[in-house]
Amino acid sequence: FSKLGEDPLVTTISFNNYTTSLMLQQIMEKPLEKKAGRNYGPPGTKKLIYFIDDMNMPAVDTYGTVQPHTLIRQHLDYQHWYDRQKLTLKEIHNVQYVACMNPTAGSFTIDTRLQRHFTVFSVSFPGQDALKTIYSSILQGHLAGASFQQQVVRSQERLVVAALALHAKVATTFLPTAIKFHYIFNLRDLSNIFQGILFTTPECLKTPLDLVRVWLHETCRVYGDKMIENKDMETFANMKADVVKTSFEDMDQEALKAEPLIYCHFASGIGEPKYLAVSSWESLKKILEEALESYNEINAMMNLVLFEDAMQHICRINRILESPRGNALLVGVGGSGKQSLTRLAAFVSSLEVFQIELKKGYSVGDLKTDLAGLYMKAGVKNIGTVFLLTDGQIADEKFLVLVNDLLASGEISDLFPDDEVQNIVGSVRNEVKGMGIQDTKENCWAFFIERVRRQLKVVLCFSPVGTTLRVRSRKFPAIVNCTNIDWFHKWPEEALVSVSRRFLSENELLNAELSKSISRFMAFVHGSVNEMSAAYLTNERRYNYTTPKSFLELISLYQNLLSKKYGELMGNMERLEGGLEKLKSTAAQVDDLKEKLKAQEVELKQKNEDADALIKRVAVEQEKVGKEKAFADEEEKKVAKINDEVSKKQRDCETDLAKAEPALKAAETALNTLNKNNLTELKSFSKPPGAVVNVVAAVMVLMSPPAKIPKDRSWNSGKVMMSKVDQFLEALIKFDKENISDPNLKAIRPYLEDPEFEPDLIRSKSAAAAGLCAWAINIVRFYEVFCDVEPKRNTLKAANAELAAAQEKLSKIKARIKELDDNLAELTREFETATAAKLKCQQEAETTARTISLANRLVGGLVSEKVRWGESVQSFKKDEKTLAGDLLLTASYLSYVGCFTRLYREELLNGKWIPFLKTLDPPILVTEGLDVLGLLTDSAKIARWNNENLPNDRMSIENATILTNAERWPLMIDPQLQGVKWIKTREGDALKVVRLGTKGYLDAIEQAVSNGVCLLLENIEESVDAVLDPLLGRNTIKKGKFIKIGDKEVEYHPKFRLILQTKLANPHYKPEMQAQTTLINFTVTRDGLEDQLLAEVVATERPDLEKTKAELTRQQNEFKITLKDLEDSLLSRLSAAGGNFLGDTALVENLETTKRTASEIEEKVKEATITEKKINEARENYRPAAARASLLYFILNDLIKINPLYQFSLKAFSVVFHNAIDKAEKSEDLKQRVSNLIDSITYMVFVYTSRGLFERDKLIFTSQVTFLVLSMGKQIEPSELDFLLRFPATPNVTSPVDFLSHQCWGGIKSLSNLEAFKNFDKDIEGSAKRWKKFVDSECPEKEKFPGEWKNKTSLQRLCMMRALRPDRMTYAVTLFVDEKLGTKYVEKRTIPFEVSYQETSPSTPVFFVLSPGVDPLKDVESLGKKLGFTMDSRNFHNVSLGQGQEDVAERALDVAAKDGHWVILQNIHLVAKWLARLDKKLEQYSEGSNKAYRVYMSAEPAGSREGHIIPQGILECAIKITNEPPTGMRANLHKALDNFTQDTLEMCSRENEFKSLLFSLVYFHAVVIERRKFGPQGWNRSYPFNTGDLTISVNVLYNYLEANPKVPWTDLRYLFGEIMYGGHITDDWDRRLCRTYLEEYMKPEQLDGELQYAPGFSCPPNSDYLGYHTYIDERLPPESPYLYGLHPNAEIGFLTTLSENLFRTVLEMQPRDSSSGGGSGTSREEKVKGILDEILEKLPEEFNMVELSAKAEEKTPYILVALQECERMNMLTRELRRSLKELDLGLKGELTITADMENLQNALYLDSVPESWTKRAYPSLNGLAAWYADLLLRIKDLETWVGDFNMPSCIWLAGFFNPQSFLTAIMQSMARKNEWPLDKMCLQCDVTKKNREDFTSPPREGAYVHGLFMEGARWDTQTGLIQESRLKELTPPMPVIFIRAIPVDKQETKNIYECPVYKTRQRGLTFVWTFNLKTKEKAAKWAIAGVCLLLSY
């Protein structure tokens, strides 16, 4: 570095699997700045070093390129790279690279063109001395630095030696494998151990023993915590013990081993971190419990069980968190407590915990934002934080790119924008200065990153299930390298026992002894379920997991059930005992009551007399009051009359007064206009106008007293009057308007009469004067009216006085009456009191009498109850003893069996648990014959469920019980939707149904959670959105009041319930999911379905019966419920009744009602039982039909095993079932009717199903139906069926007869062991001739078996046929089905689409499975036209799906559903992502849409099961129709003819020629299509010939015939063969075949009827359309290869494969036996290692090309071929050796197992040739063993040749990689020898009559070649010609062929067949050459027969 001048800059780049060249370029450009022009470099004159870590990690692409390497290489080669946006050059200067890599991981090779730029140093593991020096120095420094005891310091050297010895042992013993991928032990681990020791203080290490113990503890942490198996842990413990013994033998070994061996930072308490030993488990538990308590006070509640294992993990995690840069990888299945323990450990270390909050659409960008926040918190604010990440939160694998960078270097590219980086640098600058470091940007950034790495701890919680973790560690090495691993193990049995015991010990209901047994039983249950899950997976391929969390849930459930049920039991006992107690006391009370009654009767008599005396007195008083009241009434009338008169007078007065009112108002208004100002103004007039003076004078007159009316009324006098304005105004206001004296009136009159005395006139002169004028006028006017009224007022006054006198008189009279009334009331009150006393006394007497009668009734009525209750109490006491045991079984059942099917549930309970329970000591008492559900349900509850649509079978009832009692949320596996139907009925409108992924689903869930309703998550997939994790795990916060969903806190309602449901038939839920939910398998069972279908058959056939039955069931259910309610009510009343309960009439009446109801019910139950018996007898008659239907449904259900397209819903099946019942033939005879039903159901289901099956699977389906129907009827022997399906041939036997192969003979030997086939083998040997004739016949399945064997049953004949002629089995099974089920099950006619349309509806779409060359949608269009659905009418939408068409399709569906249109959705497989949406749309519109709405979909089937993407929902509800081309010549001919009509035949004027040629075309079309089934022998490649080719050809034929006078044979053949059909053909040999067929089928002879298409089938005479169909039916020979011009051998191969596939598939579909399959011998790794070693051992060395090249002096064409072949062989063997050695190192643990290694390992295990080998090898169809043997032969052959380069006497042509090169060499050498032009030469092939052994030397020219085989014919050595094959001789070998080169013009062309030569039977691309072979027959025959030569088969 010093040579580089000033400090160079360093940029660290960590590579991972996802690193691309773009990512690398962005990181590399970051520290660069632009210089002049296009130059870039580091700032200033500095140098920059790119330090690349994990150089070999990026993915290698298909072509072997590593993107980032290519960029670095380009830069190193040319000093530049390109700007990615502008595509301009960037020249990069002053930078260098330092790279490092782990050669045992990643891709193991670095491109040599890159490697040459680097100086390579191999950094090996340091030697022992170096290590000793390093670690001694470290430890010495630590111990010397603090004041440690001298003896401790002295012992450090021994410790280092021991540590190194142990490390060496660990590293060599524990090697990594594919599963133990993390067993990599290197210096990191050693350093980790010493890092742990450096935590110690003198307080911790007082003696050398302490030092050794600390070291032992650290080794456990660093090595032990990685171990994944108990075996490894034990090995490690022994290893440790050995090292300690040898290194520290002087120390006390017992003290060293003392437990607990745990050191942690909080051993002395939390707060002061000191690394000390934990003194005891108790003290540790106390500290952690306190910590947990403190944690729960401020955080979300965690209910942790701190057992030993958990405490150890907390200490381990805490140790990691306290370490510098301590990051942890916690590995364990979900529910192990990884997250909770981390939270507590972080709390102990005062670290905050951060977890990302997954919300919808959370992406890498969001994670970056979150990480940036964490960096700021840790790096700038210096807050210690734990970043906790679980695999559930990794929504995208690219998240791990960031995590990998964070762990590896702390640097994450592009985490902060540049301005943010500046801010960060600014934030830490002062701290950097404070540490005495120069505050450059680089130093500040380095300080920031360093602090982040110190303060930010990453804890990864991953699951070991599956390969995910292994693959991730391969792609992101930092996950394993830069973390400390803590592996959470499956709890051992001791842990399970101790955990459960700890919990149970706190339970007061269990004694210590009993809880010991219970905990042992619980641990056993957990283990047994694990075993059963393994068997379940093997047999049913279903996954079920248990986790520690499920075990804790079991304990919790058990405790809850126990306390609840114990409470209920005690309650019931108390109620009954209370009832009994009360019955006892009743009898004693009756006598007391009789005495009481006597006393009451005496008292009653006295009371009656007193009441009578009072009645008399009341009568006298009443009379008095009556008289007084009459007098008062008279007086009252008088007063009323006076009152009326007074009122009238008063009204008159008021009316008159009202008239005066306006004048008064006007006067007041006038006054209001006056004020001080205007009066003062008026007063100030010196000479006012006369009118004003008059006004003032008039006012003076009015105002003056009557006697002193002034004479002087001048202005001055007026002024004097107004002198004091205020007083004057006051006088005016208070003027006595009602008393104006006459003189005043008289005096004012003249003024008033003056016309100018008008306010309006005067206002102009003075406003005040006008006001006074108006006042005067109005006051006078008022007075005049008032004078009229006054007399009337006086009269009124007098009348009022009279009224008052009358009223006073009346009130006195009333007072008297009141006095009398009061007296009367007093008397009446006395009377009433007396009467009440009398009544009370009477009631008491009656009550007593009634109580006596009630008591008698009660005692009498409860006589039976007394006995029953007494018995119940005894029974309860007995139950109390067995309660703990009964509930233990119940809780175990509830917790664990939900996922299993019936068989496994019973096996667990009766086969494992109960037997184990009986072995326990002390024993756990259990009720004999316990029904595990009995404690949680009763008949009334079950009755209620059945009424709510729950099926009535045992499995469904168990499921419902588990669902209603489970502690975890139930998750229903419910493919037939029976569970969900029940839930929806049960919960009704209160249920909230949500589907994940639909719009606004999270809001709906949040609402449900906060409102406390029941929420159903419907149709979930195998994983649930991670956002919902807290909800599934019920991780509430704020003391259980809230829960987090995404980034929201939602209030958590205590009544909230969640139910999950999936339609998937066999989902694989990860352990994490199963830990949070209770899986319940609601899949319908055979019996359950049979009962349901029986009800439906009877409901249709005998609705009366089913109605009565349903009514009875409902009634019975209600009876049970009623009785239960009555009993409960009675007991609760009894217990609630107080001391004097004899008075409770309701109680007694309730009792009597109960008794009455009970006896009524008993009667009805008796009646019902009789009726039910009759009904059941009648119903049972129909059971066979229901049983058959149930069987068929389960066969349908199994079809998915063949192809994932075959999915059928129970709903759809139900529709078919009902249609079948309706269409079944009627019959009066019940037995006949049931038989008709069975037939109809079977056939309708067959039609419905087979319509959607591929042709190849139809026979599988029908044979499975036949076998199971016969098995169900006990009509076949299981052992025989087993033989037929498995065909367990005896291995390594030799056939004694020539007509049977060794394999067949092995089958015969095995069959002879069965009783029915004794001596079968001997008979064949003895009568070989008879059997040979039978075996060699063309259709042996139709022949009779020789001798007595013909009398065997059909199945037995099948077994024999399977051994004798496996190739004919498909035909034989077809005949078997025909015989057993009927001919209609084997006919092959397609169902017209119109018929299928009848079954469609808005909820039943049609799903067409596309096949090449068939367009099913034409049928839809033509039917649409008929029914009026066309594009023109705009009610027919045809959407061809592809990119961007999804919206178009959705709009079409929306419109169609609303308006009743048809929608065609073509090729839905092209829009995989949209299919889920389509599924939801179809479901949404399946209800409530227009009745005419229909949907038709089409899709291609997936190439493999993995590629299948069509959702289950679409497949289940749709009618599936496969439109495959029909199979068989007959069906194909009919299908081809069906494209035409009578009109077509008549359209041409030259009818005879047209019809004849058209039929030839039809036959030709059928042949070319059906020939495909013969594989490569049929066509080299598969072509999509279709009906379009045929119809266009017919049109061309018509046009040509019309246009030409003669038939243009050549033109027509050319058009058809080269264009119409030939247009598809890409292979020349196939083109020749097509041409040849047309030459054979189209020639002039056919017009005379002399043409034969096939033996026995000549061209038909002129006929009509139907006539041709009939001709085909009558004249066409049975199906055989002859119809296609092939030899019968052609079908042997494909028929054998077909029948093997048929039996293998049917076998897979058989009900599986759980007990089958023993333990496997060797492990997979051992087997692979064996094969690998064997291959490597036999693999010869490579050819030394340099040496060989030098040895071959003359490079002749032959020698060049040999050298080329050697080179190619070297490439292949080099790859073999490299890959195998790599895998070997991987298996030994020296390399990390990569994906390529895994693929190689799988291939070796499965005996297939690995892909990387086949790429470099020659074509071959062999398995690995045969392929390798062949390879060794090839190498040996080459070795012989290149040994001396002498041409071998006979060449093995198949032994070449490139046989063409050798054949060309023959021509080249001849051309050189004779100087002939190469392009004018060809090869002449002469077939000799000799074999290879007969040749000792090569020919002078050309070569002898051997090892060829002929397919399709044979070579006859005698005649030297091609001849017909012998039967069953598929590829006869050819004699040696002499090949030489000759000029083209000398080539023989007559009687020659140009025979293609191929490398393998696959033909096609393996073509080598054409050999001309002699033939007497026409060459066309062999061309049509597909004759060729093969180099290998």
Image (cartoon, rainbow, N blue to C red):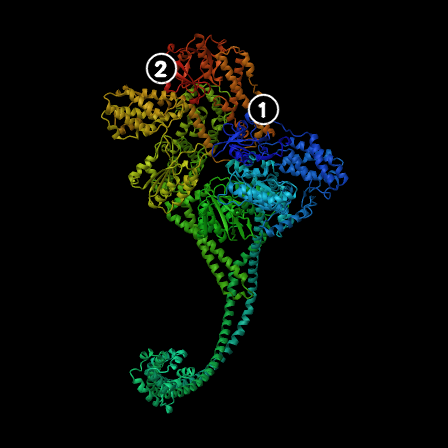
Front residue (pair 775, 1369)? 775
On screen, residue 235 versus residue 1448, left or right, reads right
Residue 405 horizontal/vertical position (percent): 57, 37
Front residue (pair 445, 213)? 445
Three-letter amino acid code of the residue under disc 1: Asp
Number of the front mark, 1 or 2: 1
| Number of numbered callouts drawn | 2
Task: Specify few, some or many for label 1: CA neighbours under 10 Å numbering under 14, 14-19, or 20 or more.
Answer: some
Residue 1763 horizontal/vertical position (percent): 51, 15
Three-letter amino acid code of the residue under disc 2: Glu
- Give SS at disc 1: helix
Report the disc number at residue 1977: 2
- Give SS at disc 2: loop
Residue 1644 horizontal/vertical position (percent): 27, 19
Which picture quadrant has residue 1139?
bottom right
Front residue (pair 210, 563)? 210
Is residue 986 positioned above or below 1447 on the image?
below
Is residue 1861 positioned above or below 718 on the image?
above
The answer to which of marks 1 and 2 sits earlier in the sequence is 1
Front residue (pair 759, 1963)? 759
Residue at 56% from the left image edge and 60% from the top image edge: 578
- The answer to whether one can see residue 1204 in this image is yes
Report the disc number at residue 1657: none
Which picture quadrant has residue 1499?
top left
Is residue 1593 positioned above or below 696 on the image?
above
User: Distance from label 1 to label 2 (Cα)?
Assistant: 53 Å
Which picture quadrant has residue 1271?
top left
Report the disc number at residue 1733: 1
Residue 831 horizontal/vertical position (percent): 48, 79
Is residue 1622 positioned above or below 1883 on the image?
below
